[in-house]
Each structure stands twice: as C-alpha cells, then as structure tokens.
C-alpha cells in the first residue's frame, strides 16, 4: 500500500516536516561536499579529458545540491543558513565524501565516485515515487546526469584494473575506502518517519543491500577483493559517519576552506550557488 501524498511545505505537520527536512539535508549535503572534494582534482587528472570530466561532474553535483537546498528554503531557510553560516557539526553528509583524496591517487577519486554514484542511483529510484511531490518532481533531472557520472567511474575502474599495477592501486583504495562507503547508508534520526510516510519508498537497509548486490560483483569481476569472507558490515562502519553530525577531523579543514572567502569578505547576502530551477 502506497503512502498518501503529502501536502505542500506550508501544510506539513511537525512529523512530516522533520522527515522531509532530514532527507533533504542528507541529499543536499552529500552533493555539496562531494563537489567540494572533486574540485581538488580539476587540474590534476591523468589526462586532459579526465580534468574536464571531473570539473563537469563537480558542477553537476553543485546543481543537484542546489535542487535539494532550494526545497529546504521552502521552510524559510536562507542559503547562508544552509551552507555558509551553518555549524560544521550540523552537516549530515556521509563521511566518505569529506575525506581528502590520497595524494596523486586517481584510483581513490574514481572508486569513491563509483561508490557514491551507485548509491545515488538507487536512492533516486526510491525517491521517484516520493509522497512529497516537490522531491519527486526533481528526480528525473538528477538521474540523467548521475547516469553519466556512474558510467565515467565504472569505465575508469575497468581501465585501471586492466593491469597488475593499476589493480593494486585500486585494491589499496578499496581497502581504505570501503568502510567509509558504508556511511552512505547510515540512517538519519528521522529514518522511520521517512519510510513510514513514503518520503523515500525504500528503507536505508534495503538500499544498502541493493548497493552491495551491484558493487561487490562488479569489483570482484575486476579481480578485486572487497571483504575477506563473512563480515559484520555494521562493525566496519566508522564511528564518525556523518548522518548524526559526527565527522572526521578532515571535515573541519574542508569546512574552513569552503567558508573562508565568505567570512573574509564579510558577506551577509551571498550569491546563490546556482539558479533556482523553479525560476527557469
């Protein structure tokens, strides 16, 4: 039985609004922080084409963040409340996305992208039938661009694993990043309400199982080892996972970089990171 369609932002009750806000913050923060990290690679990729691709992906992710942050502005928040003047421990992105890239390690970049993009693909499918129409209406635009991101990462992983040295680099990145990739599937404090109200049509546990069913066979087909036998995935998740406001030490440094110019210029009404799609 499908959940009833939720009303517009001004008619939501407290439980409904809390569920919508929690989901939107996780969505928007994931996209925004991922874009900030991709910027580190914009002129450091192994080829000119890679530089251009990662710059385009970063721009796309900022656009997706814009889509979700705009829906939070329906509740009266300003952009500076959501990004520039927000406390760092109020962000709800998965900690996978805040980690600095290993210096000069393109395998780190494309594997992290693959983990995130497959998770994003599944999450968007579960939002296409959202009971909150303002979310459902925006899914198709994001899906089209995320499909390209996923193909880009998958193609690069196949290319890197085509010889032993490249495969060893990807394996090292996999060993380092896989526990943090699981943070993409840590619940927010409103997970039960998000599912009960149909704001997202699948539970976070189901999304994780679907993600594993895609990611593990693909990586193993490249000659990689994801885990050693049966493991307790919950035990692998880092203590700082992001969805509850806990973060790694790396996040404070990235946050400082993100907000530095805004603070130095003493801005109070920042330029919007992108145009509101509702104005198009």
Image: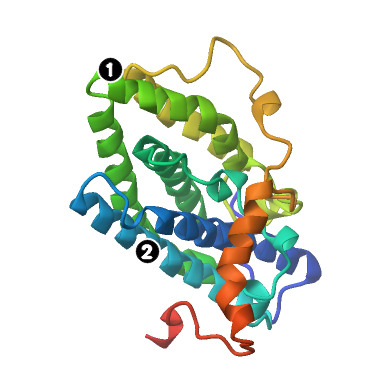
- Residue 276 badge: none
The local secondary structure at tag 2 comes to: helix
Of marks 1 and 2, the one in the foreground = 1
Residue at figure coordinates x 20%, y 53% from the top left: 48
Quarter of the image where one finds residue 56: bottom left
Q: In which quadrant of the rendered image does the C terminus lie?
A: bottom left
Judge the density around disc 2: few (<14), some (14-19), many (≥20) Cα neighbours within 10 Å.
some
Q: Is residue 260 above or below residue 60?
A: below
Between 218 and 139, the one nearer to me in the picture? 218
Please identify the residue farthest to the top as the structure is shown.
229
The local secondary structure at tag 1 comes to: helix
Quarter of the image where one finds residue 213: top left
Check the image and tell me how it is coloured.
Answer: rainbow
Residue at figure coordinates x 63%, y 65% from the top left: 256
Question: Residue 129, position in %: x, y?
Answer: 50, 57
Residue at figure coordinates x 42%, y 79% from the top left: 277
Question: Residue 219, position in %: x, y?
Answer: 37, 24
User: What residue is pinned by disc 2?
Assistant: 60
Residue at figure coordinates x 22%, y 23% from the top left: 162
Judge the density around disc 1: few (<14), some (14-19), many (≥20) Cα neighbours within 10 Å.
few
Q: Is residue 165 left or right of residue 200?
A: left
Q: Is residue 176 visible?
A: yes
User: What residue is pinned by disc 1?
Assistant: 164
Q: Is residue 58 left or right of residue 136?
A: left
Question: Residue 196, position in %: x, y?
Answer: 70, 51
Q: Is residue 74 visible?
A: no
**Which one is earlier in the sequence, the residue at label 1 or at label 2?**
2
Question: Residue 138, position in %: x, y?
Answer: 44, 68
> Marks 1 and 2: CB-CB under 8 Å?
no
Between 57 and 72, the one nearer to me in the picture? 57
Q: CA distance from mark 1 to mark 2?
A: 33 Å
């Amino acid at each position: 039985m499908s959940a009833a369609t939720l009303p517009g932002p001004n008619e939501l009750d407290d439980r409904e609004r809390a569920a919508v806000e929690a989901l939107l913050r996780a969505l928007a923060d994931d996209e925004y922080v991922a874009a900030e990290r991709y910027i580190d690679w914009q002129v450091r990729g192994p080829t000119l084409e890679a530089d251009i691709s990662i710059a385009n992906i970063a721009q796309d992710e900022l656009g997706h963040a814009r889509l979700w942050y705009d829906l939070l502005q329906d509740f009266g928040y300003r952009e500076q409340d959501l990004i520039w003047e927000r406390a760092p421990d109020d962000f709800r992105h998965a900690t996978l996305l805040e980690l600095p890239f290993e210096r000069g390690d393109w395998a780190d970049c494309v594997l992290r992208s693959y983990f995130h993009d497959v998770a994003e693909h599944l999450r968007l499918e579960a939002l296409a039938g959202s009971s909150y129409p303002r979310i459902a209406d925006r899914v198709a635009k994001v899906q089209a661009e995320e499909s390209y991101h996923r193909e880009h990462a998958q193609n690069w992983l196949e290319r890197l694993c085509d010889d032993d040295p490249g495969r060893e680099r990807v394996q090292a990145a996999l060993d380092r990043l896989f526990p943090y990739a699981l943070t993409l599937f840590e619940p927010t404090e409103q997970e039960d309400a998000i599912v009960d109200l149909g704001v997202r049509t699948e539970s976070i546990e189901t999304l994780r199982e679907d993600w594993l069913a895609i990611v593990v066979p693909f990586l193993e087909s490249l000659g990689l080892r994801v885990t050693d036998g049966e493991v307790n995935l919950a035990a692998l998740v880092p203590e700082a996972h992001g969805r509850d406001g806990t973060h790694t030490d790396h996040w404070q440094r990235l946050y400082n970089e993100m907000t530095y110019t805004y603070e130095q210029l003493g801005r109070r009404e920042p330029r919007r990171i992108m145009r509101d799609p509702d104005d198009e």
